[in-house]
């Protein structure tokens, strides 16, 4: 939800939606490759993604197109093979290149104008789960079968 909390000693904390995380784990178990791409480095993001078993955590580059290209080569993917979820103006460039561009409901107006789909839910409030529920339905799988 783009919230950052800083303590007086520089300690950083972020808020993550637990249902989004659950569905990210289930989707990975079902065979979906998930990558987190952030223009800003955050130890909190590293920690949460490690907790979820997300293997591809790309941080600290504002040009997300350049940031994802090495991973695309590794996974043998083209831009058309990628669905990307964003919320801010720095997500526009990559959104224009991918096969499916998605914005969360509370995204900036400029991004909303270029994406293929806008979630009903806001970032940090179940938008990722909403997207992954649609993915499970599209591939004909039930998230429940990947619980254990």
Image: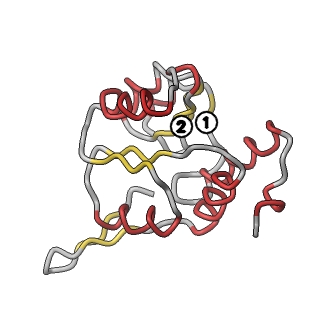
Q: Which mark is residue 85?
A: none
User: Which residue is found at the position 82% from the left and 42% from the top?
Assistant: 137
For mark 1, does the 10 Å Cα neighbourhood hold few (<14), some (14 to 19), or many (20 or more) residues?
many
Above/below status of 52 relative to 110: below
For the C terminus, give its image quadrant: bottom right
Q: Secondary structure at mark 2?
A: strand
Task: Give how far across and how far down residue 115 sits, in percent.
Answer: 54, 26
Q: Secondary structure at mark 1?
A: strand
Task: Give how far across and how far down residue 46 sits, in percent.
Answer: 36, 62
Q: Quadrant of residue 61?
A: top left
For mark 2, does the 10 Å Cα neighbourhood hold few (<14), some (14 to 19), or many (20 or more) residues?
many
Task: Give how far across and how far down residue 97 sits, in percent.
Answer: 46, 19
User: Which residue is found at the position 47% from the left and 41% from the top?
Assistant: 107
User: Which residue is found at the position 59% from the left and 26% from the top?
Assistant: 100
Task: Give how far across and how far down residue 119 sits, in percent.
Answer: 63, 42
- Which residue corresponds to mark 1? 118
Q: Nearer the viewer, residue 140 or 76?
A: 76
Q: Which mark is residue 103?
A: 2
Q: Earlier in the sequence, mark 2 or mark 1?
A: 2
Q: Is residue 133 left or right of residue 94?
A: right
Above/below status of 38 relative to 62: below
Colour convention: secondary structure
Q: Quadrant of residue 25?
A: bottom right
Between the residue at mark 2 and the residue at mark 1, the CA separation in whole angstroms equals 5 Å
| Labelled pair 2, 1 in contact (Cβ < 8 Å) | yes
Q: Nearer the viewer, residue 93 or 141?
A: 141
User: Which residue is found at the position 46% from the left and 20% from the top?
Assistant: 96
For the N terminus, give its image quadrant: bottom left
């Amino acid at each position: 939800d783009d919230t950052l909390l800083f303590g007086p000693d520089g300690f950083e904390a972020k808020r993550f939606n637990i249902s989004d995380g659950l569905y990210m784990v289930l989707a990975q178990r079902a065979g979906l490759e998930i990558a987190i791409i952030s223009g800003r480095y955050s130890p909190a993001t590293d920690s949460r993604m490690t907790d979820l078993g997300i293997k591809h955590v790309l941080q600290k580059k504002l040009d997300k197109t350049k940031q994802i290209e090495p991973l695309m080569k590794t996974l043998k993917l083209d831009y058309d093979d990628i669905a990307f979820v964003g919320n801010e103006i720095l997500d526009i460039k990559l959104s224009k290149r991918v096969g499916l561009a998605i914005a969360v409901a509370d995204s900036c107006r400029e991004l909303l104008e270029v994406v293929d789909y806008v979630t009903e839910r806001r970032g940090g409030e179940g938008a990722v789960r909403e997207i992954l529920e649609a993915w499970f339905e599209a591939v004909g799988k039930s998230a429940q079968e990947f619980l254990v």
